[in-house]
Amino acid sequence: VAVGIVTADIDRNTYDATMWISRRGEPAQPWTAGGSSDGYSPAVSPDGRWVVFARVPQGSSVSQLFLADVDGMICRQITESALGVNSGRWNPSSSALAFVTRIDVGGRYAAATEHTAHRFTGLGGFADGFGATFDRPRSIQVVHPFDGPGTTIIADASLDATDPSWSPDGSLLTFTGKSGPDSDLNARNSVFACAADGSGRQLVASGDLVMGCPRFGPDG
């Protein structure tokens, strides 16, 4: 079991992240030394060999996904998202990870330039503690960390998609996304499903509801 622990350091006015590993029959041990960017949101692969976690790379201000073996001997970055990635979800075969990242639609946030005022044209375009969301919609992507660089877009920014989850055999993904052009007015969303490469997307459920965290049953 991998666990991420975040503590506040009042004197330094920052948060420190430390990851711990607990093996069956053994006491939990610190897996990282700790620090303001030392990793969080760990997820152990189903085969028990790898841990994926989020960390802020040196010289950056946003977190990316890193992959390490459970002994911590090998560690490398596997995403390069302009606005960062906070967590990843393994497929059942431990060969791919689905993750959510925000897309800088107008190039406003990636460039270190003076920002103009926002112009809001709908509701729901702002989140407490985060800021504007309408020009930073979410996209679901998949990375195959053992097959070289690059990601596959499963749901583009037009859906503002989140909550990805794999089917038991790893052939399908389900997620939530916008429910039509007026979704900002009614706060509704829908559940979708598609193949692991993003093809064959279908609407699974929609209605007068706010839906979240869809999951496949044991039989898929």
Image (cartoon, rainbow, N blue to C red):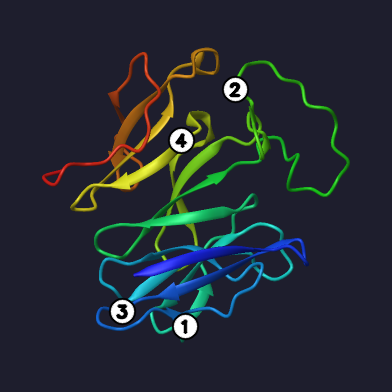
Position in image of residue 43 (x %, y %):
39, 63
Residue 161's disc is 4
Where does residue 111 sit, x and y in percent of width and height? 79, 48
Q: Are marks 1 and 4 in contact (CB under 8 Å)?
A: no
Q: Amino acid at mark 2?
A: Gly
Residue position for label 1 = 74
- Marks 3 & 1, CB-CB < 8 Å contact: no
Secondary element under disc 1, as helix, strand or loop, is loop
The residue singled out by tag 2 in the image is 124
Corner quadrant of residue 22: bottom left
In the rendered view, would you say 87 is above or below 134? below
The answer for how far apart the CA atoms under marks 3 and 4 are is: 34 Å
The residue depicted at 48 percent of the width and 30 percent of the height is 159
- Secondary structure beneath dot 2 equals loop
Instruction: Let me know if residue 189 appears in the view.
Output: yes
Residue identifier under label 3:
23
Circle 2 crowding by C-alpha within 10 Å: few under 14, some 14–19, many from 20: some
Q: Is residue 187 left or right of residue 38?
A: left
Q: Can you say which quadrant of the picture contains the N terminus?
A: bottom left
- The span from disc 2 to disc 4 (Cα, nearest Å) is 15 Å
Say which residue appears at 71% left-offset and 35% top-offset: 106
